[in-house]
Image (tube, rainbow, N blue to C red):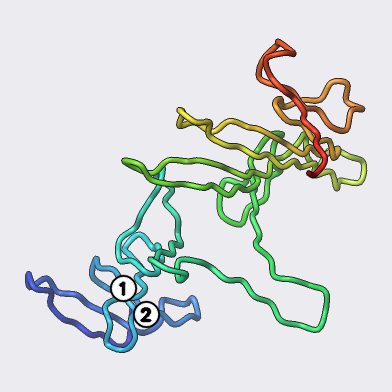
Amino acid sequence: RGLISLSGKKADNTVVTLKLGGYGDTNRGEIFTHSNHALGFATNNAAAQMVLNTDGHLLIGNTGAIQPDAYNSHLEVTGTDTSAGISIIRYGDNAAGPTLLFGKSRGASIGSIDKVDADDVLGKIEFYGTDTGWESSASIRACADGDWYSSSDDTDSPGRLEFHTTPNGADQLIERLRIDSSGRIIAGRTTSDPTEVRMTLQGNSASATSYTVLDLRRGE
């Protein structure tokens, strides 16, 4: 494996080997470390600006993985200014815009297809901050809102959006609001009764005088 081999030594005399070449009969070229070391990339004679670590994770802006709640992400972007971000920009003389795509399959291996079940999470955005460690403060989730692939035309894919926040004095997310597959807005609970109601708001107390469920005001 490899056609060109470059070797060097670390301060402790451990040999680091970089190879350039091909991999078997896969018809692709590769750059890889033959030893158990990460692969770093840099410009302008700087320290490593991007690292592919030994777990196959790409780290941009840092050389060591940071894993809030043990999220072992393949891509990590860190920084101390506006460089800590990801931009997706599309140009074209048309109405289409850029896409951030989340997907979920119950297939057991990468590339295999099996239908999702009701309430499966199809994708989510998690918001974290630190106190003594990383804590989750809010979450937006897309979920399967019922059985999929169940209609006569095989196109059934009901979904819902959920909005979660962590209350003051706690460290666990609670669902606050959802928009279900029927377009109903439900806050304070997870179901609407009767189902014909388009908006359901429920307070956190059985007493009507102890909690204002809805307050509508006009501008001053």
- Looking at the image, residue 154 lies above or below residue 87: above
In-image side of 195 versus 26 (left or right): right
Q: Amino acid at mark 2?
A: Ile
Give the quadrant of the C terminus.
Answer: top right
- Looking at the image, residue 44 lies above or below residue 40: below
Residue drawn 82% across the image and 40% down it: 218
Residue 37 x, y percent position in the rendering: 25, 68
Give residue 115's quadrant in the image.
top right
Q: Amino acid at mark 1?
A: Leu
In-image side of 118 versus 60 (left or right): right
- Identity of the residue furthest to the front in this view: 220
Could you classify mark 1 by the number of other residues whose Cα lies within 10 Å: few (under 14), some (14-19), or many (20 or more)?
some
Residue drawn 70% across the image and 11% down it: 206
What is the secondary structure assignment of the residue under circle 2? strand
Residue drawn 71% across the image and 10% down it: 207
Task: Tell which of 95 and 75 is nearer to you.
Answer: 95
In-image side of 95 versus 127 (left or right): right
- Between circles 2 and 1, the one closer to the viewer is 1
Callout 2–callout 1 Cβ contact below 8 Å: yes
What is the secondary structure assignment of the residue under circle 1? strand
Q: Identify the mark nearer the N-term, 2 or 1.
A: 2
Residue 67: image tag: none
Give residue 92's quadrant in the image.
bottom right
Residue 39: image tag: 1
Figure label count: 2
Q: Where does label 2 land, which residue?
A: 31
